[in-house]
Amino acid sequence: MTGLLAAGLAASGGRILTIKYDGTRSGNLRFGPWTYESSRPDGVHGQVGDLEIFAPRAVLEAPEGKSMQEAEGERTATFEGEVVVKRGRVTARGPRLVYSEATGVGVLEGPAEMRQEPAREGEDPVEVQADKMTFDVDADVSTSEGSVRLTSGNQEGTADLVYYEEERGLAVFSMREGTVTLVRRRSGEQGDLVIQAREVRSLTREKQLIATGGVTLVDGEITTTGDALYYDDNEGTAIIIGSPAVSKNAAEGLTLSAGTLLHDVKKHRVQAYRKPFELPEATFAKQGE
C-alpha cells in the first residue's frame, strides 16, 4: 500500500495516535504490527493531540491477541532514524522514540536535544541536552534525564533530572545524589556566578529561581551559604535564609551571619536582610502540586 494515507484509526481519545505516511505500509492488516517506511526523513508523521512526531520509519503494535482496532488506546508505536518531535515552540531530536497510547507518554532516547523558541522578541531560547527525554501528551510537560544540561541566555544548569513546563517556562532541576549546579556567565574579571543546591526551580522567562536543600552561592571572592535562597537575575540580588545564613569574603577576610542575608551580585556586597521574608514556593509549584 503506497501514497499519502491516513493509517491511524479515528481518534476516540486524547492519547490515540494517528499516522500519515509518504511511502509504504506492511504487516498483517488486522492484527499488525504495521511497519511504515519512507525515503524521506520526515515521511512518517505521527500525531497525538498537539504533539507531532516525524521519522523515516515507524512500527505500530497491538497487545498480543488483540486486533489493531480493538487495541485502540493500548497500542505502542516505535519511531526510528533521526526522529523529530514538535509541540508549539518546542522541537526535539533523537534517534528513537517509543510512544504508548495507554500512558500518553513518548520517550525520546538519546543523545537527545530540545530547543524552545522564545515567546517574544528579546527573550532567550531554551535549549536542553540529555540522555533521554519524556513527553506527556496530557500536559505541556517534558522530563529530561541523564547528564542534563539546560541553557537559556547566559545561564546554564546541570542535573540528573529536569522537569520542564514548556509554555510556563518552569524548569525543576534535581539530583539523585550530589547537587544541582547553575552558572550565570559573566564577562570581565567578575567571574561566573555559581549556585549549588539539592533542588533548583527556575522560571526561565522571568529569570527568577529558588534553591532548596542546602545552598551555596559563589560570587567571585564571596561565598554565601544557607538552607534556601531566592534569586532574581533582573535585580541581581539573592535572598538567602539559614540557621544562620553565612557569607565569607575571602579577599577581605570578613564573615557575616544572620537568619536572612541579602547578596547583591552586581555590587558584590552582602548585608543582613531586616525585612520579613518567606520563600515564594507557591510561585514555583509544578502542575498538580
Image: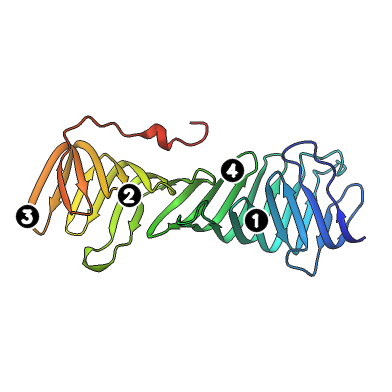
Marks 3 and 1, how far apart at CA: 53 Å
Location of residue 245 in the rendering, given as x and y in whole percent from the top left corner: 19, 40
Nearer to the camera, 61 or 46: 46
Residue 85: image tag: 1
Looking at the image, tell me whether mark 1 or mark 4 is earlier in sequence order: 1
Location of residue 270 in the rendering, given as x and y in whole percent from the top left corner: 16, 47
SS at badge 3: loop
Marks 2 and 1, how far apart at CA: 32 Å
Marks 1 and 4, how far apart at CA: 13 Å
At 14% from the left and 37% from the top, the residue drawn is: 258
Location of residue 266 in the rendering, given as x and y in whole percent from the top left corner: 22, 54
Residue labelled with disc 4: 140
Q: Quadrant of residue 55?
A: bottom right
Mark 2 in CB contact with mark 3 (< 8 angstroms): no
SS at badge 2: loop
Q: Label 1 amino acid?
A: Val
Residue labelled with disc 2: 234
Mark 2 in CB contact with mark 1 (< 8 angstroms): no
Looking at the image, tell me whether mark 2 or mark 1 is earlier in sequence order: 1
At 16% from the left and 33% from the top, the residue drawn is: 274
Marks 2 and 3, how far apart at CA: 29 Å
